[in-house]
Image: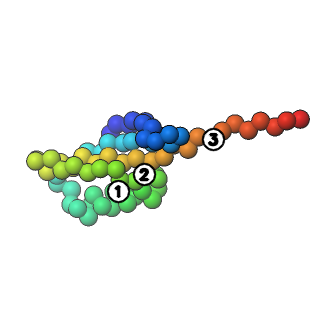
Amino acid sequence: MSRDRRPLSRGVEWEFRDVVLSRHLSRNAVRQLLVEMAEHGGWELDRVRIAADGVRRVVVRRKIIRQRPTLWAS
């Protein structure tokens, strides 16, 4: 798995993760893995590619939320 950070639009940053899944995993196992990533990690599906040898290359992404510092005037 690799991670990447890219801005897609102004002011929004996304974190990307590449997930490579074996051809021996069933569709249900892959679905369950992606559901767990979405529910517990905040990831959403960006793209899926299935190679000729059956290996699935999945790219998931999630928003990076930056907090702005607040200045308090005394």
In the picture, residue 16 is in which quadrant? top left
First reached walking from the N terminus: tag 1 or tag 3: 1
Q: Mark on residue 64?
A: none
* Residue nearest the viewer, comparing 10 with 23: 10
Residue identified by numbered label 1: 34
At mark 1, the secondary structure is helix
* Cα distance in 3D space between marks 1 and 3: 28 Å
**Mark 3 residue type:** Gln
Residue furthest to the bottom in view is 28
Local crowd size for mark 2, using a 10 Å CA cut-off: few (<14), some (14–19), many (≥20): many
Q: Identify the residue under disc 3.
A: 67
In the image, residue 46 lies at what x, y percent? 34, 50
Residue at mark 2 to residue at mark 1: CA–CA distance: 8 Å
Bin the neighbour count of mark 1 within 10 Å (Cα to Cα): few under 14, some 14-19, many 20 and up: some
Query: Which residue does the image show at 40% across and 47% down from the upper left?
Result: 61
Q: Earlier in the sequence, mark 2 or mark 1?
A: 1
Name the residue tied to disc 2. Answer: 43
Amino acid on which disc 1 is placed: Leu
Name the outermost residue toward the left. 52
Q: Which percent across, then down, holds residue 11?
A: 53, 40
